[in-house]
């Protein structure tokens, strides 16, 4: 995608075009009223700020400090928000061993905690599918299984999250270019530019995106204070969010939270451009499966079996 952002795109552009009339002022007041009632992203400066790609380092620093203050007021938690840039010469990939996954959903809960996902309404970036052994028909899978003991006989488990596609349909349909893929392969969202139209959700064949219909609720003691601007900072109401490979961790050389907590070692993450990485070894030597390959999205997320 081009780095250029269309100057007329976005909810802010109509203010520049028509704010000179009393009617436009009244309309703007009506649009802003729900934002004033929201507990995060409430200020006029938040509504009018530029797209992430246009922000100077100084502008971004001011914005991050403002967000830290808003979170402190709303949740009573002191947090630290940083902007983590892609690492040169890195293209991240993820592989998941379906033979080893036991369906415990520990990855789901670790992801929620790491990425400050709302508890009420509950938002989860990872869904774990239970399938009959020998079948890869995800349309007949069970996402809501409730057995306390896993794995169940005759079943195997497939966690699904954002596939970080090379040809992502979600970015193509966004009318304001609020979502894009960065040089390391991670598709991100500018939460302050998203207008909440949910076109990206409809376009994603993996159902990997989530929408904040209500103000996120997270207990103060469960907030992860180390936040990335494009990753796990607490999102405002009315925007889309999703997995971002824990970029606030992975761009510092760490592993995603879901991988670290996996009890069976089913998850492998790394730089696909490094021929000596474990992910590269798997892609060379294993028979990998691509979910919904016929969709033409070219995921950077792969599945494989031991045999």
Image: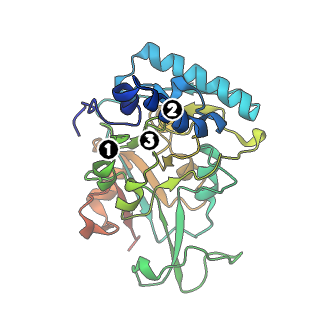
* Vertical order, 13 against 201 (above or below): above
Tag in front: 1 or 3: 3
Q: Does the CB distance between marks 2 and 1 fall below 8 Å?
A: no
Give the residue at mark 2.
Answer: 26
Give the residue at mark 1.
Answer: 276
Dot 3 crowding, Cα within 10 Å, few <14, some 14–19, many 20+: many
Give the Cα separation between the discs numbered 3 and 2: 23 Å
Give the residue at mark 3.
Answer: 194
> Which residue is at the front of the view, 239 or 266?
239
Q: Residue 290 at x, y = what percent? A: 32, 66
Is residue 86 visible from the viewing direction of this image? Answer: no
Q: Residue 11's image quarter?
A: top left
Q: Earlier in the sequence, mark 2 or mark 1?
A: 2
Is residue 231 visible from the viewing direction of this image? Answer: yes
Q: Residue 12's image quarter?
A: top left
**Element carrying mark 2:** helix
């Amino acid at each position: 995608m081009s780095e250029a952002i269309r100057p007329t795109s976005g909810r802010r552009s109509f203010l520049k075009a028509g704010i000179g009339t009393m009617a436009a002022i009244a309309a703007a007041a009506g649009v802003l009223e729900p934002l004033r009632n929201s507990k995060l992203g409430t200020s006029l400066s938040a509504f009018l700020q530029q797209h992430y790609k246009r922000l100077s380092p100084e502008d971004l620093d001011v914005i991050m400090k403002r967000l830290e203050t808003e979170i402190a007021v709303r949740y009573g938690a002191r947090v630290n928000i940083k902007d983590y840039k892609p690492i040169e010469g890195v293209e991240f990939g993820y592989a998941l061993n379906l033979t080893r996954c036991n369906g415990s959903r520990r990855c789901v809960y670790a992801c929620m905690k790491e990425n400050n996902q709302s508890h009420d309404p509950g938002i989860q970036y990872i869904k774990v599918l239970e399938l009959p052994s020998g079948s890869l028909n995800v349309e007949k899978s069970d996402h809501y299984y409730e057995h306390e003991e896993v794995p169940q006989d005759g079943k195997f488990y497939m966690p699904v999250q954002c596939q970080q596609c090379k040809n992502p349909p979600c970015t193509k349909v966004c009318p304001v270019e609020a979502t894009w893929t960065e040089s390391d392969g991670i598709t991100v969202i500018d939460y302050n530019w998203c207008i909440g139209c949910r076109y990206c959700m409809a376009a994603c064949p993996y159902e990997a995106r989530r929408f904040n219909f209500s103000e996120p609720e997270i207990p103060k003691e469960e907030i992860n204070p180390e936040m990335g601007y494009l990753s796990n900072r607490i999102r405002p109401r009315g925007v889309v969010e999703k997995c971002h490979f824990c970029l606030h961790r992975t761009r510092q050389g760490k592993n995603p939270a879901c991988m670290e907590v996996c009890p069976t070692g089913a998850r492998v993450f790394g730089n696909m451009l490094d021929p000596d990485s474990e992910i590269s070894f798997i892609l060379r030597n294993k028979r990998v499966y691509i979910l919904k390959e016929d969709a033409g999205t070219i995921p950077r997320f792969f599945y494989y079996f031991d045999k």
